[in-house]
Amino acid sequence: MLKFWKQGARGHESDADETQESLAQGLRDAGEAGAFPALPDPDLVRLFNTAVLAKLTAGERLFDAGDPADRLYIILAGRIDLQGTDVARSEGFGAGDWLCDVDFAAPAARDAGAVARVPTTLLIIDTPTFTSFDASLKTYLIEHMARLNLDRLRRLARRQRALTTLNGELIDALFEARTQTGFAQTPVARQLFAKVPALPVSTMALLNRILDERTTQGEIVDLVTQDPALTSLLLKAANAPAYGLQQKVTNVSQALVMLGHQVVYQIIMSESVRQSLPGTPFFADLHQRAVEVSRIAFVLSQTVNVAKPAEVATLGILSEIGFVVIELLKAYNQRLSILFDFLEPAEMGAELLRSWKLPEALCSSLEYQHYPQFAPPSRVPEDVRTNVAVLYLARRFYHALHQDGSRLPTLFARDYLVALGQSGVSERELLYNRLLPRLRAQIRVLPKSLADVLQA
């Protein structure tokens, strides 16, 4: 319990004796700690006669974050640690130090709490006490607080520079550890790429058309309508339970009216990719996640008006394809399968897509898709940085919507929001206030698994 003594207190003789002894000890502690340099003795006596002397036991709290900063604390003996903010979490103050982040005229809320680490004695000056002092003592206190605050700012600035340097070194080390692979360029990997069924020629043609800004909607409609393979793929997929359409789709024109040409394209792409995956539950789950991430990325691109929605939707669909190559490696080299868990799926997927002759913009975007987990935006090539940022945030939003406990690293999450022009927006605001309303407006054409999550 915080215990106070004040000069002039009335009470039992023993209490008065204890008060006098405590004040005398406080003065001795102040002198030994050098708590009041160059303060004349009369002012020092006046200070101790007016201010409050207090003692804390080890572990006792002095104040909490959020309390008003309306008192000046001067440590005469012991130690006080600030805690509760990143900057001040381990900042300690000892005998002779002042806790002087105080404004007697307009106190703000404290941004950190304070606790005594050992038995501690303090002198406390509140607003009425400060107001009662004469001009010379007020001037001394104000000037000394200013000097101490300036010294503290300099210490914190040095600490910040040291932390920044250390942070940069850790980022460099993490970056090097995550990017020194190169296995995807080996002959063994290229042999495996040939074993993965490529996308159908008709799907490749549609992909190139949809990514070409000069292509009209009519040309896309004509390509799908005139190609039996695309038509068959579309009708089969659109009528599957995964899309949950209430009305049976019987022809391409009906699909285009019900779904729109962008959704028709996404369905064809996702089903084409699915045919390249092994028919196992693992890859079925992988593909479902990719389809949902694709649709979230598409709507996110529209919401923040960055990148090309069709391109980032395609990236989402293709984003998990690298796992195919890794699983093939494990199947063909079972005794070494544990080693292949350390391969980077993004790198493998990008090289697979290059072997399929897909546009380099897609390949490069997928190659860097996991960089946001361990590198700032500046480490991602500028020409694919926006695509990578959209895909990263779409994945984070996927996990948030499913509440599956999975979390992508957040080290650079805010930096990637800034890269998308969202410097003043939190992830939560972007997801719940802007993205979800648009997704819900499109709920009838969403994959059923994503629609179910939104409705729940």
Image: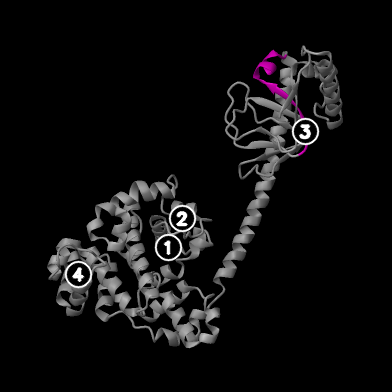
Distance from disc 4 to disc 2, alpha carbons, whole Å, reads: 37 Å
Q: Position of residue 67 (x, y in %)?
A: 59, 30
Q: Which residue is mark 4?
A: 239
Residue type highlighted by circle 1: Val
Sequence order check, earlier mark of 4 and 2: 4
Residues at marks 4 and 3 touching, judged by CB atoms closer than 8 Å: no
Q: How far across and down, in percent of the image, does residue 241 sit? A: 24, 68
Determine whether label 1 and label 2 are within 8 Å by CB.
yes
Q: What segment carries the magenta color? A: 118-133
* Contact flag, marks 4 and 2 (Cβ < 8 Å): no
Mark 4 lies on a secondary structure that is loop
Reply above or below: 424 against 289: above
Residue that mark 2 sits on: 416
Q: Is residue 120 magenta?
A: yes
Crowd class of label 1 (few under 14; some 14 to 19; many from 20; radius 10 Å)? many
Give x and y (percent) for residue 54: 75, 26
Distance in Å between CA atoms under marks 1 and 3: 53 Å
**Residue 170 lies in magenta, yes or no?**
no
- At label 4, which amino acid type do we have? Asn
Q: Secondary structure at mark 3?
A: strand
Precedes in sequence: disc 1 or disc 2:
1
Disc 3: which residue: 120
Q: Residues within 10 Å of mark 2 (few under 14, many from 20)?
A: many
Nearer to us of marks 4 and 1 is 4
Q: Earlier in the sequence, mark 3 or mark 2?
A: 3
Give the spatial CA distance, label 1 vs label 2: 9 Å
Q: Secondary structure at mark 2?
A: helix
Q: Of 4 and 148, which appears nearest the observer?
A: 4
Toward which corner of the image does residue 169 lie, by quadrant? bottom right
- At label 3, the amino acid type is Thr
